Image (cartoon, rainbow, N blue to C red):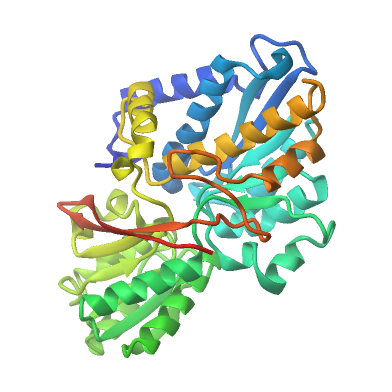
């Protein structure tokens, strides 16, 4: 049901670019308010290259929320503008570019909150910057546990150890890895070979899957880490085929090897072996096409198309962009709603004046039971959403199909 960038025609892409420019006001200026009375919300996502297949649809979710809020108006006649930037370099998400984008947001006093990024390693690079700037950052899809929990999260908050500026509306790697291990065992897969891309997200996901798969009685026949920019995986896959696993598990994203591994499995004796991973391979068909069939993956989000609370959002999104929603469109919409709600509450609390970043950040942290298309949103002390949902999908004829979803509580 989902449309990815590679399936769009050049004409459709041109129309999309025009729509994005129309609602984002380019570099973030407002068309109806003087300088100093416009609130900007930064959006940092990979919107070019291989990651654009999910980055653009995620960006569109946030843009829609901001556009609708613009039409309703903010207290005191304040303006509202989106400030979208691309963190992909040469077609792949870049932590360095993400940091550069966040520094751009931080240097603009009108930017009071930001949405993004899409990838956990980009988030790990960005969080120290938003922490130092006191800029509220809300992630729609970043799932690495270390972004919010434990010593790893503390290291990201060195500038202001007592301040948490990072929040997310999705679940975590550990919950995805556990759900995938349970799912694999329910499908009666007894042995697995694990491959990961050695990035923050992929390594965390693979390690948690391995831990839980073993705990559930499964056998791990091997676990390899990919070298960056590898394109030919045939030697590795021939080795994997030699141990005859029931399942190949991949921790990583399509652009860091997931898509090519699935394609090359068919020339190395693994074509009939199921493939499994997390939300990083939700766009697997953009590279593997119908060879994606036999693949299972999770999303750290509910299937918005199945949620009664999301039907208005889904209808509005399709009407605005003329495509089905993407895997994290609804999450990005919800993340933007959190930011906008915080701006509105902060402005009202200060006589309908332009709020400060500190005032907006305080209101984001207080978010509790905010109604959104993905359900009520509130955050725990770490900045994690209190009621995460994980969805399970498969591919048939190169098209994702929904299997089930699990409601969780922190």
Image height of 386 relative to 318, above or below: below
- Give the residue displayed 46% in from the left and 40% down from the top: 58
The quadrant where residue 311 appears: top left
Quarter in which the N terminus is drawn:
top left
**Is residue 305 placed above or below 93 in the rendered structure?**
above
**Nearer the observer, 358 or 213:** 358
Q: Position of residue 132 (x, y in %)?
A: 82, 50
Q: From the viewer's side, name the closer residue of 326 and 45.
A: 326
**Image position of 371 (left or right of 158):** left
Q: Where is residue 393 in the image (x, y as percent from the top left)?
A: 27, 57
Q: Nearer the viewer, residue 227 or 51?
A: 51
Residue 398: give x, y in percent of width and height: 20, 51
Q: Tell me which residue sits at (58%, 45%) in the image.
A: 116
Q: Name the quadrant containing residue 367.
A: top right
Can residue 235 be seen in this snapshot? Answer: yes
Task: Give 372 or 265, whichever is nearer the viewer.
Answer: 372
The residue at the point 28 percent across, 75 percent down is 184
Q: How many marks?
A: 0
Indicate the position of residue 342 as horizontal and vertical percent values.
67, 35
- Left or right: residue 23 compared with residue 103: left
Q: Quadrant of the C terminus?
A: bottom right
Specify the quadrant of the image occupied by residue 390: bottom left
Residue 202 visible, this orientation: no
Q: Which residue is drawn at 63% across and 36% down?
A: 339
């Amino acid at each position: 049901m989902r449309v990815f960038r590679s399936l769009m025609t050049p004409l459709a892409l041109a129309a999309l670019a025009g729509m994005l420019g129309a609602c984002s006001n380019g570099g973030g200026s407002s068309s109806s308010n003087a300088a100093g009375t416009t609130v900007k919300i930064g959006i940092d996502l990979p919107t070019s290259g291989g990651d654009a297949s999910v980055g653009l649809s995620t960006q569109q979710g946030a843009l829609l929320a901001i556009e609708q809020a613009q039409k309703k108006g903010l207290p005191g006649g304040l303006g509202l503008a989106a400030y979208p930037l691309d963190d992909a370099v040469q077609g792949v998400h870049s932590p360095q570019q993400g940091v550069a984008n966040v520094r751009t947001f931080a240097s603009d006093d009108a930017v009071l909150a930001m949405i993004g990024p899409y990838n956990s390693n980009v988030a790990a690079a960005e969080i120290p910057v938003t922490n130092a700037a006191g800029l509220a950052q809300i992630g729609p899809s970043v799932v690495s546990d270390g972004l919010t929990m434990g010593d790893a999260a503390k290291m990201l908050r060195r500038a202001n150890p007592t301040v948490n500026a990072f929040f997310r509306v999705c679940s975590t790697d550990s919950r995805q890895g556990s759900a995938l291990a349970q799912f694999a065992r329910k499908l009666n897969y007894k042995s697995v070979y694990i491959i990961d891309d050695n990035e923050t997200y992929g390594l965390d996901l693979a390690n948690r899957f391995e831990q839980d798969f073993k705990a559930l009685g499964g056998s791990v026949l091997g676990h390899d880490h990919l070298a960056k920019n590898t394109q030919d995986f045939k030697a590795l896959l021939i080795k994997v085929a030699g141990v005859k696993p029931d399942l190949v598990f991949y921790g990583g994203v399509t652009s860091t090897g997931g898509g090519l591994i699935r394609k090359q499995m068919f020339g190395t004796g693994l074509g009939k072996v199921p493939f499994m991973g997390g939300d990083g391979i939700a766009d697997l068909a953009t590279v593997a096409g119908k060879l994606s069939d036999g693949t299972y993956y999770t999303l750290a989000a509910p299937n918005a198309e199945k949620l009664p609370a999301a039907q208005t959002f889904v209808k509005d999104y399709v009407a605005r962009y003329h495509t089905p929603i993407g895997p994290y469109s609804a999450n990005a919409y919800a993340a933007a709603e959190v930011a906008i709600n915080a701006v509105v509450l902060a402005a009202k609390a200060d006589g309908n004046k332009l709020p400060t970043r500190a005032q907006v950040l305080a209101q984001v942290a207080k978010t509790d039971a905010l109604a959104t298309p993905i359900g009520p949103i509130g955050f725990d002390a770490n900045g994690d959403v209190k009621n995460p949902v994980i969805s399970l999908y498969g591919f048939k004829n190169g098209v994702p199909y929904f299997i089930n979803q699990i409601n969780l509580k922190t």
